Amino acid sequence: MFDVNKIREDFPILKRKVNGKTLVYLDSGATSQKPELVIETMNKYYRETNANIHRGVYQMSIESTRLVDESRQKVARFIGARVEEIVFTRNTSESINLVAYSWGEENIKAGDAIVITKLEHHSNMIPWQELCRRKGAELRVIDVDETGMLIDQKKQEVIQENGFKVVLGGLKDLLDLKVKMVAFTGQSNVLGTVTPVESIVKMIRKQSSFSLILVDGAQMVPHMKVDVAKMDIDFLAFSGHKMLGPTGVGVLWGRKEVLNKMKPFLYGGDMIGEVKLTGATWAELPSKFEAGTPDIAGIVGLGAAVDYLQMVGMENVHNYENEILEYALNKMEELKEEKIVTLYGPDSETRGGAIAFNVNGIHAHDTAQILDNFGIAVRSGQHCAAPLVTSFGVSAMVRATFYLYNTKEEVDYLVEKIREVPKVFA
Amino acid sequence: MSDYKEIIIDHYKNPRNMGELAGADKIIDEANSSCGDLIKIYVKMVDGKIKDMKWQGIGCAISTAGASMLSEKVTGMDKGDLNKFGEAGVVEMLGGEINAGRMKCATLAYRGLLKVFN
């Protein structure tokens, strides 16, 4: 039985005050809060176990190594992967850069095409933009409609700027045999749009049979059950800190057959097989992609975050978030009808726990700051997705995101305080 | 509402010197990449001093008030005066209290104006 009040007790930060008011944290899309279990596990690691992994024969090093291995197993089970396919990185951006550099440098050449969508966070946009620029490849961008849903078919538009050409079009029309990589988000960080991963993947496999597929799971893995074994994709990138884990640890899952063919990304310690002054061989997966001492405590913390999410159950997390989102969307629709706000994004059926909006006539930063005075933490600006935000004809949006610890009372409070915003400038 | 002093709201609602300046000697574009705010600054110069400043832009209350108030303050300033005025001068001009998260908004016009002397 999902009891949000019990869940909230596990998150010490939710008790703090901001500007004299109890914190209402609605920015989990940027980073989630951490349960006591994660904080304590990391604390305990530093107090009792701290030692570098893989190198020592002494007890603590062996324990450290075992904890990192266990975390890797937990993450693997969590997403239906084989354990050697889990590569620990710093964050989603680094995971995607790993693919863009390691796989991209070897496999993309002039005349090839890479497909992304307009929904992408900059982290799944700029690495591909730059790869295309370096290689003389073509970047194709799947456009979105006015509700933020991916468009299947539309007249293609060619944008030429900064010595770079981009083709903007519909999903169906952009997929052909020139395409070598399709990289798209599972859920938009701004509008909350949940993309139809299964049908997109089917279409890619049918129309672009030479292409690999990368899913940006940063806003997906924390919020729904993901099973890579059933997804028919090649890479999944996500961040620990958005799923109750600490900052500093991200994950790249890659299909073993693909990872094995890739060159290392970073070179140095721990990623080698045999080393001579004249050259080296590489370690097996996943060490080949994990040069240097990793964020050991962070990895251990991420393992605890996965334990926590498993304890609650991802289906429960997902259902509860849907309930909160639907409740919030209804309330926000009322504000929209009263001409107080403008809402952006799709209906609740195709939307995760994010609501992007503006208070009419008031800049997103001003709205966010006034809400902060009431203890409400929301994000404002372009949300690292400038092309998407500006395509709605605004320079910035306010975004409220929900997670398993948010309540309907918090939504009510948000709505009540949004009504106060125009009064400040009246 | 510590940041939203009456003076800010006044300049936000009735921005001064907003518009194009015909015959401007310099036109500068400045942007705030985190929120997409944009400002275009027009200045007329005499003997290395700002004689007149006008501006156009889209922005929040803080950046709008920052530009509006600055446009009244800077007449007669040269490079040295403007440097001396500094970001601290901007904060003081806006009532003495700007939270750290809004400094980029507050100083948008000021940062643009500095480029006049580049």
Image: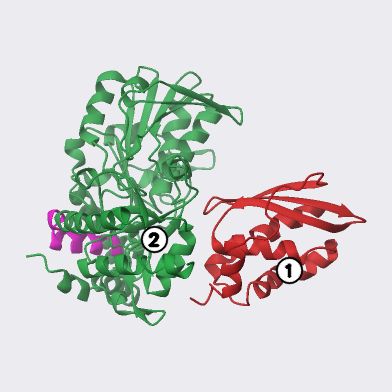
Chain colours: A green, B red
Residue A298 % position (x, y): 35, 63
- At 83% from the left and 58% from the top, the residue drawn is B50
Residue type, label 2: Asp
Label 1 marks a residue whose chain is B
Which circle marks residue B86 in the picture?
A: 1
| Of the two numbered discs 2 and 1 in the rendering, the one whose residue sits closer to the viewer | 1
Q: Tell me where the magenta segment starts and ends, as one range.
A: A300-316
Is A135 or B55 nearer to us in this picture? Answer: B55
* Residue A314 included in the magenta stretch of the image: yes
Would residue A416 be found to the left or right of residue A278 on screen? left
Q: Which residue is mark 2?
A: A295
Question: Is residue A280 visible in the rendered structure shown here?
Answer: no
A366 over A85 or under it: above or below: below
- At 21% from the left and 48% from the top, the residue drawn is A348
Is A394 or A314 nearer to us in this picture? Answer: A394
Is A229 or A29 nearer to us in this picture? Answer: A29
Q: Name the quarter where the N terminus of chain A is drawn.
A: bottom left
Q: CA distance from mark 2 to mark 1?
A: 40 Å
Residue A228 % position (x, y): 21, 40
Most extreme residue toward the bottom, as rendered? A20
